[in-house]
Amino acid sequence: MAQVTLDEILVILKEHDLLVNSQLNNLRLSFKQIAYNSKLVSGKCLFFCKGNFKADYLVDAQNRGAIAYVAEQLYDQVALPGIIVTNIQKAMSLLSAAFFGYPQNSLPTIAFTGTKGKTTSAYFTKAILDRTYRRRVALFSTINTIVGLNPADSVKSNLTTPESLDLFTNMAAAVHNGMSHLIMEVSSQAYKKNRVYGLHYNVGVFLNISPDHIGRNEHPTFADYLHCKEQLLVNSTICILNADGTHISDIYYAAKATTQPENIFIYGREAKVAELGIPVDFQYESVADSLAENKIKLVANTEHAKRLAIDGTYEISIPGDYNEGNAVTAAITSALMNASSEDIAYGLAHTHVPGRMEIYPTKAHGTIYVDYAHNYGSLHSVLNFLEAQKPTGKTVVVTGSTGDKGVDRREGLGKAINEFADEAFLTTDDPATEDPQTIAAEIAEHIDQRKVKVVYIADRKAAITKAVFQSAPGDVVLVAGKGHDAFQKIDGQNVPYEGDAAIVANLVKGL
Ligand SMILES: CC(=O)N[C@H]1[C@@H](OP(=O)(O)OP(=O)(O)OC[C@H]2O[C@@H](n3ccc(=O)[nH]c3=O)[C@H](O)[C@@H]2O)O[C@H](CO)[C@@H](O)[C@@H]1O[C@H](C)C(=O)N[C@@H](C)C(=O)N[C@H](CCC(=O)O)C(=O)O
Ligand SMILES: Nc1ncnc2c1ncn2[C@@H]1O[C@H](COP(=O)(O)OP(=O)(O)OP(=O)(O)O)[C@@H](O)[C@H]1O
């Protein structure tokens, strides 16, 4: 049974230089529950006071049975003993791992970071390793959290990377359920908020970085965003890097600071990493790159890459040239976890990622694509790929942008629309506390409206419907940004929403 004693807690906090003082001194005192949300407290719980915290929550926790708390300050209003620390998020992560008996030691873990491609790469990897390990592969992704084989072990995720206590709860559940491996996405926010503090991965993948998540509630600067993402490499035994992304020198030296070059695998389309003057370990090229067929040839260039024995031609189930790199990372990570090239071939050819490049052909109208692209990098990648398919009609984009976060996305979406689209329907996408029309106007500022026709329709379903019905054969309609998301975040509430994919699937019936 999970538990942690005061003795262990104080040792850990002292070791990490986090302890200020403790009002508790019975070293044998054992906590049978830990929580950071008062509503979940029951029994003899150790409670963590973190984030935008109010003393009333601690009163609530005490009323429900909490016997002590960990915080960065004393709460005199509450007659509970406190353990005071310098950083509550770091303390919570370390103590959660200890409470659950360090489940990561029994769960070889592959972690993906990157501005784009985390979910897709994680799904490719899961499809491969599911075959190797008879589905005993846990997944913590933006879409789903899977900790076991039963339907009840699979739930929708709230965050890309969960709060540390939830992360270790899920890891412990996965171990308990007999899962053999874990694949997880690690967001830059997870490092910024110390959600993964002290966690080490067997394999860490850095997919790419482009400006995103920079703004008032996220990262103050791009440098901070890059620094947070690079922490994944410092915390990984084996690092996998993309030679074709920007900032490769920075990223490579971050990896090399703690990892022997022998344990770094660089992949790319060219034979060399130009900026570094070293060969890539894995080189790949498109053999087929159309909507009907996506296929790559993968070749190992260096001795340590050759040892993985995964040279070959692989079919990829999801179109888009950018998915070729995602597939390569899945092949390398899976091989490092002992998957055969047959398992890799099967997994890459049989992966489905909800809301990523879903295609709905119609007879009387155009082809409708639903995709999760919601910043410059991703929208540019998708539109660039669709343009390469040489559509005979016009290109129409339906999109919006989030409120209170990723404010720089507005310029990026406008820029990508300007580069590729003939028409844009701007609409609502998680406006939070902002006005969606104002957000749309800020996107439109970056579109040359002499070239691209811009229409604003607040209701997202109405915007999608209009775009689909007015399209003609040969047109491309890209509904970008929400995929299968079944809510709109408005004023702190998750307001139910059908989801782009469900709306399009219904609309195209009979078209
Ligand atoms: C800014 C930020 O990181 N906020 C996160 C943080 O909020 P917080 O700690 O301030 O929590 P809060 O909701 O204000 O509440 C304060 C504390 O009081 C407790 N409480 C509250 C009410 C009550 O009755 N009793 C009680 O005890 C809460 O449980 C909490 O511990 O902890 C919460 C979970 O414990 C997260 O849901 C929340 O994420 C916000 C909402 C969020 O969406 N963050 C985004 C930006 C994010 O992290 N995104 C990344 C992906 C983006 C990327 O790719 O980088 C992700 O990993 O998902
Ligand atoms: N390697 C890539 N490079 C550029 N764009 C990509 C790449 N992979 C996927 N995309 C685009 O980004 C969208 C989101 O992909 P995915 O969900 O895999 O990324 P993510 O990193 O998990 O994103 P998010 O942080 O927004 O959840 C896709 O629908 C596609 O448009």
Image: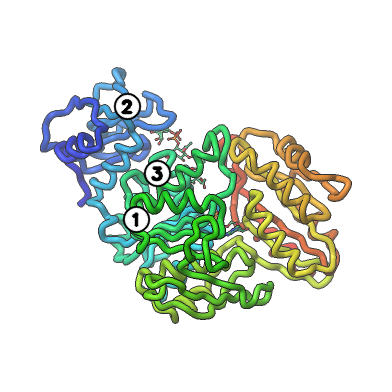
- Residue placed farthest to the right in the image? 450
Specify which label sits upstream in the sequence, 3 or 1. Answer: 3
Q: Position of residue 279 (x, y in %)?
A: 48, 65
Q: Can residue 170 be seen in this view?
A: no
Residue holding disc 1 = 259
- The amino acid at mark 2 is Glu
Q: Position of residue 274 (x, y in %)?
A: 55, 59
Q: Is residue 63 above or below residue 287?
A: above
Q: In which quarter of the image is residue 239?
A: bottom left
Q: What element carries label 2?
A: loop
Q: What element carries label 3?
A: loop
Question: Which disc is residue 72 wearing?
Answer: 2
- The amino acid at mark 3 is Glu
In this rendering, which labeled residue sits more in front, label 2 or label 1?
1
Q: Does the residue labelled 3 lie within 8 Å of ligand 1?
A: yes
Residue holding disc 3 = 163
Q: Is residue 197 above or below residue 354?
A: above
Q: Which of 433 and 241 is in front in this view?
A: 241
Left or right: 132, with 379 as reference point: left
Q: In which quadrant will I find the C terminus? A: bottom right
| CA distance for labels 3 and 1 | 27 Å
- The amino acid at mark 1 is Thr
| CA distance for labels 2 and 1 | 34 Å
Ligand 1: image quarter = top left
Disc 2: CA contacts within 10 A as few (<14), some (14-19) or many (>=20)? many
Question: Which disc is residue 479 wearing?
Answer: none
| CA distance for labels 2 and 3 | 18 Å
